[in-house]
Image: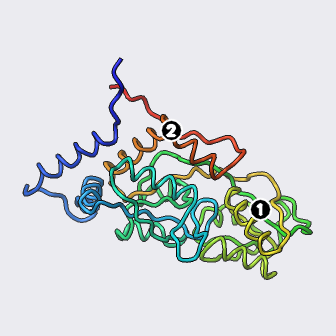
Amino acid sequence: MHARAPIVPVLVALLLLAVLSGCGSGDEPRGEDAPSRSGIGTLFEAQQRGEIRIGVKFDQPPFGYVAEEGEGPVGFEVDLGRAIAKKLDVEPQFVRVTTGDRVEMLQSGEVDLVIATMTHTRARDEIIDFSVTYFRDGQRILVPAGSEIESVEDLAGRTVATAGGSTSEVNIRRKAPEAEVLTYETHRKALDALLRGEAEAVTTDGAILMGLKEIAEEEGAAVKIVGGPFSDEPYGIGVRQNDSALRDAVNFALMELVEEGRYEEIYREWFEGEEPFTPEVWPAGS
């Protein structure tokens, strides 16, 4: 029995051939559909540079954060991005993004991919494209240890902090319309508001809250996560709209990581003791 050849290198080679054979034709698309903003162009340019620019968070453990001042980011999404870049035969360049600017930085070309706790929603899918889901979570609540808040139903009349422009903001406004919602640039800044007493709760996805809880406890604050999940948050890797070739290359890389067991290794390293999420894997045959 012959070993199956890796899909990603073959795909990349075919894409590069398509680009080179198409150079100089008189009918290249313009504007939003131009190759410089399409998957073939982005992948080709990344291959030419030898690196791909990946937007990750620098303050969001365990997904992406700077553990040591002056060092690069570490985390689940950083390791996943590094593994995907290796499959694409390029070096990863990690660029800091926040919840508020990650889509804009992707659209402007400052980054080629966004792997930054971004929920794949239908509204976002109208302006950018996404990979298959690589992580799934649900929104919960973080409060001081002595708080009487036990669930989202207890937030009426309370001040709740979250990151502006996030699905967490949308969800909490819908689920607790009588709460006063305070928005911040990052979830870490929302946590700071809680620790200063400006907010009575922080809300975002459960895994993010676990990271915030660790930060708070390291700073000597006693906090707890309460209530069950009240939303569904499928995370996808963001690529520019019409970036279908790069999206496919990323999808195939992710699927190969699942098949090889590398995805599970990365997951278990950052979410010890939790049952790993398994991304969708499509059949390899014709």
Residue 54 vs 243, above or below: the answer is below
Residue 219 x, y percent position in the rendering: 78, 75
Q: Amino acid at mark 2?
A: Val
Q: Is residue 81 left or right of residue 88?
A: right
How many other residues sit within 10 Å of disc 2, few (<14), some (14-19) or many (≥20)?
Answer: some
Q: Secondary structure at mark 1?
A: strand
The single residue placed furthest to the top in the displayed view is 1
Q: Secondary structure at mark 2?
A: helix
Q: In what quadrant of the picture does the N terminus appear?
A: top left
Residue drawn at x 73%, y 59% as measured from the top left: 210
Q: Which residue is mark 2?
A: 258
N-term mark: 1 or 2 = 1
Total count of labels: 2
Q: Which residue is mark 1?
A: 141
Residue drawn at x 47%, y 41% as measured from the top left: 257
Give the image's coloring scheme. Answer: rainbow
Q: Amino acid at mark 1?
A: Ile
